Image: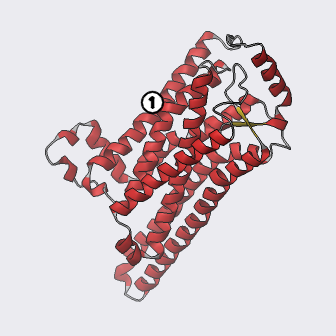
């Protein structure tokens, strides 16, 4: 996903930028704040809390998967990749984005803006494809369990994760280069956007949104149906094995509901954070939004990186156990890596 502004939506804005650039307007001041100093300080405190939650939450996931041997599974390699990309969003993207929104202008200069656009585009597209790969992994594991155990090993998953990072980096670098982001784009003082042609915007929309989102929705739907089918088969088996298996039936039904709940929350939160910006991208010719609204859409997308660790903590007992061991420094004990956290 690229931080972009459609040319036809901001013609006056574009003209203003060109005039300012022709005048070599290198020094500028942000507009005066319309909020009281107390609200201004509160905004920065809340922003720091969000960044801290994102960084620390994803760092806990990274340490957990790295340290505990029981978590060294193929699927958790994808969870680790997602947590690492979310961690980098919290450290490299969110601070600048939050300051940009609070100050109502970009205060870091053109060179940092270019780096911000490249890193932001790379990490957000990487997060999307990490979620898509998790969907592929879960679908393959449920639909072909024996084939999955024979083919998918940690070394294979390392290759998949490394390839995903490389492809996302190459795509975003090439996209910015051929779009002229590094050289010949006009940057308006106080803002950090670049302008895309319609064809470039369409390509980016398909590659970073439509394709991975289609994979996520289709495969997660299939995962839900397969899990429901398995639970139904267990209930039918229990019906033929006397009432002593009623507890097993009850447990399977609870597991089915829990799986559906967690799946629904993960997908719903992801879509909630993802859709506003891309709806704007799709309907850019129809709706007219201020740049402040666009920045809030982008921030909402980044906040998904903050929410993911919270979802892990709420719905995965192993993560809560790992947090307890990490916070109490028990991970520094001998053989702590072999603790039972599952």
Residue under label 1: 52
Q: Residue furthest bottom?
A: 240
Q: Nearer the viewer, residue 44 or 66?
A: 66
Q: Position of residue 37 (x, y in %)?
A: 61, 10
Residue 203 image point, x, y percent: 70, 51
State which quadrant residue 177 falls in. Answer: top right
- Residue at 46% x, 72% y is 142
Pick the front one: 181 or 6: 181
Where residue 125 appears, as percent x and y from the top left, is 57, 47
Q: Nearer the viewer, residue 49 or 19?
A: 19
Q: Check the image and report above or below for 97 versus 72.
A: above
Depicted 146 relative to depicted 45: above or below: below
Mark 1 Cα within 10 Å, few/some/many (few <14, many 20+)? some
Quadrant of the image containing the C terminus:
bottom left
Q: Quadrant of residue 264?
A: bottom right
Left or right: 63 with respect to 124?
A: left
> Residue sitting at 38 percent across and 39 percent down?
59
> Which of the 4 image quarters holds residue 73?
bottom left
């Amino acid at each position: 996903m690229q931080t972009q502004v459609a040319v036809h939506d901001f013609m006056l804005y574009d003209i203003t930028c060109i005039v300012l650039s022709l005048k070599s307007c290198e020094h500028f001041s942000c507009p005066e704040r319309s909020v009281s100093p107390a609200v201004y300080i509160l905004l920065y405190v809340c922003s720091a809390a969000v960044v801290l939650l994102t960084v620390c939450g994803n760092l806990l996931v990274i340490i957990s998967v790295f340290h505990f041997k029981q978590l060294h599974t193929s699927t958790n390699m994808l969870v680790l990749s997602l947590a690492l990309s979310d961690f980098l969003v919290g450290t490299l993207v969110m601070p600048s984005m939050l300051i940009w929104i609070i100050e109502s202008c970009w205060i870091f200069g053109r060179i940092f803006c270019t780096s911000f656009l490249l890193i932001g585009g790379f990490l957000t597209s990487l997060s999307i494809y990490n979620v898509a790969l998790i969907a592929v992994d879960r679908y393959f594991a449920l639909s072909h369990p024996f084939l999955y155990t024979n083919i998918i090993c940690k070394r294979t998953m390392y290759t998949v994760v490394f390839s995903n990072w490389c492809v996302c980096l190459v795509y975003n670098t090439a996209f910015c280069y051929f779009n002229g982001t590094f050289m010949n784009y006009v940057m308006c003082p106080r803002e950090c956007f670049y302008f895309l042609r319609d064809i470039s915007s369409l390509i980016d929309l398909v590659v970073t949104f439509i394709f991975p989102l289609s994979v996520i929705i289709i495969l997660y739907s299939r995962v839900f149906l397969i899990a429901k089918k398995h639970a139904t088969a267990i209930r039918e088996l229990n019906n033929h094995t006397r009432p002593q298996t009623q507890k097993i039936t009850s447990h399977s039904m609870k597991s089915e509901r829990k799986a559906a709940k967690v799946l629904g929350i993960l997908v719903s939160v992801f879509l909630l954070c993802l859709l506003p910006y891309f709806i704007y991208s799709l309907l850019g010719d129809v709706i007219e939004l201020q740049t402040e609204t666009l920045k809030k859409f982008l921030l909402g997308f980044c906040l998904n990186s903050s929410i993911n660790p919270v979802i892990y903590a709420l719905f995965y007992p192993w993560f809560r156990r790992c947090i307890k061991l990490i916070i109490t420094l028990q991970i520094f004990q001998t053989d702590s890596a072999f603790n039972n956290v599952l």
